[in-house]
Amino acid sequence: MLDAFSRAVVSADSKTACIGGAELDSLKSFIADGNKRLDAVNVIAGNASCIVSDAIAGMICENQGLIQAGGNCYPNRRMAACLRDGEIVLRYITYAVLSGDASVLEDRCLNGLKETYAALGVPLQSTGRAVGIMKASSLAHINNNNTEAQAGSRYKKNEMAQGDCSAITSEAGSYFDRVISALS
Amino acid sequence: MKSVVTTVVTAADAAGRFPSTSDLESVQGSLQRAAARMEAAEKLASNIDNVAKEAYDACIKKYSYLNDAGEANSTDTFKSKCLRDVKHYLRLINYCLVVGGTGPLDEWGIAGQREVYRALNLPTAPYVEALSFARNRGCAPRDLSAQALVEYNSLLDYVINSLS
């Protein structure tokens, strides 16, 4: 498992070069924006169960066949497995956001996931859609622009320092995209 | 590669939980100290050739018998390899400064070190001398800030201990 710093070390070692100049500058901006990263992880972790259950419910709303007999969310047992998997995927994404590198997500979550789901008969398209909804709501939480209109009675305001979160938003988005592309 | 973040993530994953507040606290603690480490890494990277050459010269001066025929510093090839080894340790120290842990030194420098030097019949005392020279050569605030020097020196101490 690597983080942003050890990733720089591994790539410098393959060239037998010291780390300086441009690579250090990007790591310095990682350090300078560290609190944004920690806020992002904190807000996703703090709203995880809401993000996951919304995503699974949304996926089912769009495809009612999933909860009819023969559907993949039909008995509670399989619906529960679905919620559990959503939480696991989201958890590995928070690890990737925290470390600033996708290796933990790739090695421990995505490696072989598609094959496992194919063998178990889990519909990959629906899974991808659920991850897409988790992406939208997580990014809204990171930017703190989720509204009462979107969330209804479950709306919860997150107290965070305001600022430009475009870099961490696109980085977090890329981890969700990685999951979606690994499943398709 | 072991670092504060990977340690925290490994522990959280083993327990199957999201990163907790205390996990985030320990990551933040390491980020706060990171500025000094980055400064030391930057200075070392920009000056590594000179630092390595000075350290190498100092150890050959102390152990001049190494220049005798058949010894480890006798030919031009040997000389360049000795200098390369010193530089190799300094490069790993640069990596450790970036990562914020001793992972690169442990994995790429120290593991198997004793066996290699024994197999090649190399003395470790000259390495210790070269690194000790570098250890005592750095000066704050002339070369780098006091905190950066502490981080740099403690890694040199770590290598010296591993060799002695």
Image (spheres, coloured by chain):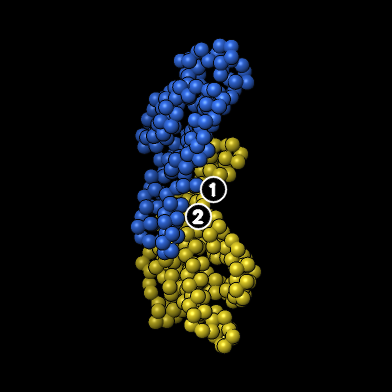
Chain colours: A yellow, B blue
Residue underneath mark 2 = A100
Q: Badge 1, how many Cα within 10 Å: few under 14, some, many 20+?
A: some
Disc 2 + disc 1, Cβ < 8 Å: yes
The vertical placement of B113 against A5, above or below, is: above
Kind of residue at badge 1: Arg
For image coordinates 50% across by 63% down, the residue present is A93
Pick whichever, A135 or B92, lies toward us. B92
- Judging from the image, mark 1 belongs to the subunit labelled A
Label count reads 2
**Position of residue A158 in the picture relative to residue B110 (left or right):** left
Q: Quadrant of the C terminus of chain A?
A: bottom right
The vertical placement of A61 against A159, above or below, is: below
Q: Is residue B69 visible?
A: yes
Residue underneath mark 1 = A7
Pick whichever, A15 or B38, lies toward us. A15
For image coordinates 51% across by 12% down, the residue present is B65
Q: Is residue B18 visible?
A: no
Which label number is shown at residue B96? none
For image coordinates 63% across by 71% down, the residue present is A118
Q: CA distance from mark 2 to mark 1?
A: 9 Å
Secondary structure of the residue carrying tag 1 is helix
x and y percent of residue B105 in the render? 48, 37
The vertical placement of B29 against B61, above or below, is: below
- Judging from the image, mark 2 belongs to the subunit labelled A
Which one is earlier in the sequence, the residue at label 2 or at label 1?
1
x and y percent of residue A98 in the render? 46, 57
For image coordinates 44% across by 79% down, the residue present is A151
x and y percent of residue A124 in the render? 61, 73
Pick whichever, B66 or B93, lies toward us. B66
Kind of residue at badge 2: Gly
x and y percent of residue A44 in the render? 44, 66
